[in-house]
Every structure is written in structure tokens, then in C-alpha cells.
Image (cartoon, rainbow, N blue to C red):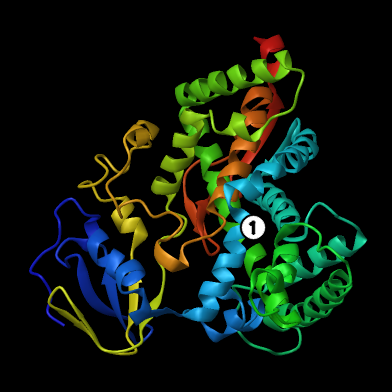
Amino acid sequence: MAMPPQGRQTSPTWLNGYGDIFKTHILGCPCVMISSPEAARVVLVSKAHLFKPTYPPSKEKMIGPEALFFHQGSYHSMLKKLVQASFLPSAIRGLVPEVEQIVLNFLPTWENTTINTLQEMKRYAFDVAMISAFGNKQDLEMKGIKHLYQCLEKGYNSMPLDLPGTPFHKAMKARKQLNETLRKLIQERRKLEKPEGGLLGVLLGAKNQKIDQLSDSQIADNIIGVIFAAHDTTASVLTWVLKYLHDNQDLLAAVTREQEGIQRKIIEGNRRLTWDDTRHMPLTTRVIQETLRRASILSFTFREAVQDVEFQGYYIPKGWKVLPLFRSIHHCADFFPQPEKFDPSRFEVPPRPNTFMPFGNGVHSCPGSELAKLEMLVLLHHLTTSYRWQVVGDEDGIQYGPFPVPKRGLPVKVTPRNIIKAAA
């Protein structure tokens, strides 16, 4: 595979000298690394049929082999259509009261305590994911599903050693129990004349959309897959949002003013937060966008060439892995001047096409991106208007697990704003 003589001088330092497309080996596996927006679009969009998603077998076992993101072609297209139907703005706008209530339940438990931001955001995002998956019927059965999922999650990034006592073995045991619990729930809901809400209701109603009825295992795998995709990434992004706002107090003050303006309208109208309110949070939305760019939680994605591929003078043999490097694109000064600076104002103008891909791109992009944005906006509305937070301990450093997050999960002391004002 021929390599260009040099890369952009404005690319991240480690890319200098390698070019936008280069080959390497990861654990002995031949890989092609891509940091060009145009080349990434070829792999993810225009020639996506030539590059299939690829994951370690252990991940497929844990989530379920029939989850949509392990597939491509007609089966994937059918599932993507169904899942997207659950997360379109028209579908999730009705979730605002439920999401807001989750926020209002969480925030008082943080008052005057030191919290692990990442862990608390995981709890929050998981509760939102449960409502989006199963509807607002949250009973004892849901608590059982939550417990089993948490056992499964603990072993997700462990070594795939299926031996008694190992995290992987415990996770697979929980996965089996989770599958049985979901099957019972699915069978119960099939008996209802009208499927209840959430993604489960949409998947159960597939036969009414001129689509073959999905099997219990197909539904279970996709429910688990969506919960996996929905909560860990969102929690990581929210953790970074709090970090960046903490480190930029003028920006925090500006976001607070924006949210207080919405709060006044809510009080004057004697109402709750609405979907339309979340559409009028331009600065807060840009803060989220800049966090998605700066933190780049989804740093890259794996694809595998299903046949020999030639494009732009490059030859990629069948079976080689291809990694579009989202973080490198997001941190390239050609597209985002002063890329290491946290500057939400850069999103006052739409970024160049294919240079901002926080949720991926193409047929395998995240279908839940709008829900993720919604739950961030609702939380930030209440958090900024009612609380302040102070990082506890060393403020610098990053840890991976698997997504990049502030060190130690960003411990913060949360204090009600009225106490701060009284002390001022």
C-alpha cells in the first residue's frame, strides 16, 4: 500500500510524517488508519457496503449476535429503520417529562456531597435508557433487569476467560439470566392487544409495518445492544461537560444565564420544561457539540474490508481492518483552528462536511444521538440553574474504561446555588 510522503503539518503530532492514510499492525493484525474526512466518508458512507463492522467475538457474545451493529445489508437496514423510529425527534419529544423527573430525583441526592461524576452520570443515563427501551412502566421486573445488566457491564472490558470466578464468566452468567428475563417480558407483552411504549413496543410491532415478526432473541439482543450504546457514551460526555464548564467559569455563567431565561418562562407559564424549550438552548447546545469534538469519546471505529478495495490510489486487501480516526479529524487545525482550545463559538458556523462525526457517520451512525442530546440538555438546565460543583483533588489526567474520561471519574462537591449566594 503506497503511502503519501507526509501528512498535514496541522494534524496531531503523532500523525506527522504518516499522512492521512497509512498502514500499521495492531496485535499483529494489519490495519489501515484513516484521518482524512474524504477517506472516512468513503469507508463509512459511499462505499460502506465494502467495509463491514467488526468486533471481538467476546463482545458479540455479551451483547448478543443479532444486535444491529454487528450486521450490515438487509437485516441491518430493517433493524436500523425500526430503532431509528424510536429515537426520532417526533418519538422522543414526549419523553421530556420522564427525563426531567429522573433529573429531579437525582439532583437532591448530590447536594452537599462529593460524587463520582462518571458513576452518577452512568446511573442517570441508564435510567433514561431503560425508559427509552421499555417505556415508562418501571416496576420490580425492571429493577431485576437493571441488576443483571450491571453485572454484565462489569465484565464487558475484562479478559474473555470463561472460567469460574472471572469477571467474564460472571458477566456471561448474568447475560444468560438477562436473556431469560427479557424473553419472559417479551412474551408477556406479545399478549397485549397494543404493545406498550419504548423500543420494545416498536420491535414487537414490526409485523404491523410490513416487516417479518422479530424473534424473541432478535428483540432481546437489540434491547441489550441499545442500552449498551445509549448510556456509557452519554455518561462519559456529560462528565466532560462538567469538567469543561468547571474550568471555564465565564462560559458556565453564560450557560446559566441562558438557562435562567428559560426557567423564567417556565415559572411565568406555570409549567414544566418542554421539548420546545430544549430547542431554544443555542449556547448550551454548542457547549455539548464542542465537548463532543474536544473529548471525542468515540475516538475511532473498526471496519473490515469484505473484498479487495481500491480508492484514491490506495489498495486495501480483503480482511484488513480499517480504522477511521474521528479524534484525529476532530483535532485537526485545518478544520478546527486551535483544536486544543475549548471554544463552543466555533459551532456558530456549521463545520465542514465529514469533519464532525461524534456519533459516527453513514448507515452505522448512532440512531440515538437526538436522545443523548436531549438528556444532556435537560440535566444541564436544572444543574446550572440550581447548583455549582467544585472538582475535588487533582484536576488533570485522563483514564480509559474504555472511553476517555477525566481521571478518577471526576470527583466533584455539589452545592446548591442558594447556599453559595447566602455565603457571598
Q: Nearer the viewer, residue 155 or 322?
A: 322
Q: Amino acid at mark 1?
A: Ser
359 over 72 or under it: above or below: above
Question: Outermost residue, right direction?
Answer: 140
Residue 408 visible in image: no
Task: Determine whether, in the image, residue 63 is placed left or right of residue 103.
Answer: left
State the image quarter where residue 30 is shown.
bottom left
Looking at the picture, how far across and down is residue 417, in whole percent? 68, 20
113 over 154 or under it: above or below: above
21 over 55 or under it: above or below: above
Q: Nearer the viewer, residue 299 or 46?
A: 46
Looking at the picture, how far across and down is residue 381, in whole percent? 63, 30
Looking at the picture, how far across and down is residue 36, in whole percent? 23, 61
What residue is rendered at 38% in x and 37% in y? 342
Quadrant placement of the N terminus: bottom left
State the image quarter where residue 178 is shown.
bottom right
Q: Secondary structure at mark 1?
A: helix
Question: Outermost residue, left direction?
Answer: 5
Q: How many marks?
A: 1
| Label 1 CA crowd tier, 10 Å (few <14, some 14–19, many 20+) | many
141 over 25 or under it: above or below: above
In the rendered image, which residue does mark 1 sit on?
A: 86
Residue 249 visible in image: yes
Task: Determine whether, in the image, residue 14 is placed left or right of residue 348.
Answer: left
Task: Determine whether, in the image, residue 423 is placed left or right of residue 27.
Answer: right
Looking at the picture, how far across and down is residue 163, in whole percent? 71, 90
What residue is rendered at 68% in x and 89% in y? 162
Q: Nearer the viewer, residue 68 or 86?
A: 86
Quadrant placement of the C terminus: top right
